[in-house]
Amino acid sequence: MSDSLFSRFIGGTISLGLGALSAMVLGLLGTMVATRHLSAEAFGAFVLLQVAASFLTQVSGFGLNASVTKFVTDTEGKPHRRRLINTALCFRLFTILIVSLVTLIARPALSTVFSSSLLPNLAVFVPLLFLLQSSSGLLKSVLQGFFLFERISITDFIASLSNFLLIVAFVLFLDRGVIGLIYARVISLSLSCAFAYFSTPIKKQLEFHFSILKEVLAFGFPLQINDIMTLVFSRIDTLIISVLLGPAGIAYYEIARKIPDSLVRLYEAFSSVYFPLMSRLFALGEQREAAKMLNHSTRWISFLSIFGALIALIFGNDVISLLFSEKYLPSVPVFALLMIGVNLALVEYTLGYSLVAIGDSDKPAIVNVVHTAVSLLANLLLIPISGLVGAALANVAGNLVGSPLDVLFLRRRRVDVKIGDYLKPILIFGAYWLLILFLKPNTLLEKISIIVLFILTCVFLSVITIEDLAAISREAKTTLFKALQRSRSWSAKV
């Protein structure tokens, strides 16, 4: 990989990672406020509202987000990029309008289906949240294609900071309950969409080119199936829980998955850099360098996410009670299992992004059909038997089946995927899980000792290398230096 691309990769990941980390912290703080001032039923209804908006976003996306990123990345010349982006924006607005009208017409049916979980007066907000979430996703995909990672980071920071401040205002001080949560979400998304729109470096105008749209949709159609399958296997548990256990069950499960979902958002900072750069490497024919980036990425992602699972296993009770109050302690075992599921999911996502980057946009859809079938079957079998723990086990089972298929497809394209790189930290975690079950550590010193031993084992077995740490340190210093320079420049202008 060239030094400039490597610098973009590390620098962009650090920049977006810092923004995503702040968004994760602010999101957790907002949830802490909400869970302490709302009933479990009200909070569960708000979660289901967001799931409904996300479902509409995915089923009507036509794979535009990933397609636009890849086409902008692969395209040279401002005029063609302008035509591509304006065509995509016009088409997305058209689909949003049609789906929103259908949703408003079907609102009585929606309220009837979720009468026990989704308060009838909340269904009217689904089209509005759908509009904002869809627009935000597409605009950030455009910025991603231009490698404008800092602007994506600012967009996310605006959304998270304003959402937290508005939750404090509407829920804590004005006591508006679940309606206050919705107002906070709507306003914060509106502000971030406005920033992302004006940050897009093209001339915005009404233009539509059918030939361009046809090409984009042809590439994006398999990704549309993939998006739908992704939403189904990631949220089918919530829908089944809403039917079998009601809104309180949704709230407990949502608390258990709050940190795992936040880590997925943190991963999105990485994938926003990884995907366009992998597309560029494959477009340039640098397949060996692309494989090198893939293997380094899966190794580090596996280590960091499974380390999080170890923390959840050891300190789960403390984390849940501290962040969300002791009434949510039944969520602890679910939290630990979902952290393991996150490890498997993030590795699979990385392999899937690599398939799309190489041009095989149909393969992730095949993987996700299998993933969704396993997840749906496991949820239907395990939730009635084991409740929320059954849903978490189904999550792990579904995430297990994706990576082997991804590896098979990548190797058919002669991409050298090293399975041992990402399996090694998982196997080390399994050994330490058995050690924890045997020793049952209670004191803080015992728990910290296990964590330190885990890290040392990973260093000894080359999961973490000196070269990795040196590269990250070098690029982190460069990114920090540039940020300080910009800060001084802005201060001087003021």
Image (cartoon, rainbow, N blue to C red):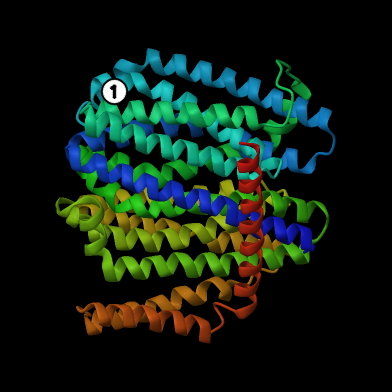
Residue 37 in which image quadrant = top left
Residue type, mark 1 in image: Leu
Describe the element under mark 1 as helix, strand or loop.
Answer: helix
At 65% across and 58% down in the image, what residue appears? 481
Which quadrant: the C terminus? top right
Q: Is residue 54 left or right of residue 274?
A: left
Query: 249 left or right of 123?
Result: left
Can the viewer see residue 62? no
Write the residue at 36% across / 22% down.
125
- Answer left or right for 286 relative to 446: right
Question: In terms of depth relative to the viewer, which is nearer, 367 or 271?
Answer: 271
The image shows residue 265 at horizontal and vertical percentages of: 47, 49
Q: Residue at x 51, y 32 (%)?
A: 192
Is 438 above or below relative to 390? below
Quarter of the picture holding the N terminus: bottom right
Q: State the image coordinates of residue 340 (x, y, percent, origin top left).
A: 39, 64
Q: Is residue 376 above or below residue 402?
A: above
Can residue 137 be seen by looking at this rendering?
yes
Quarter of the figure with residue 318 = bottom left
Which residue is denoted by mark 1 in the rendering? 122
The residue sitting at 30% across, 83% down in the picture is: 435
Give the farthest residue toward the left: 327
Depth order, front residue of 480/164: 480
Disc 1: CA contacts within 10 A as few (<14), some (14-19) or many (>=20) = some
**In the rendered image of this protein, does residue 22 appear above or below residue 161?**
below
Of residue 291 and residue 156, the one placed in the foreground of this image is 156
* Residue 71, x across and y down, in percent: 74, 38
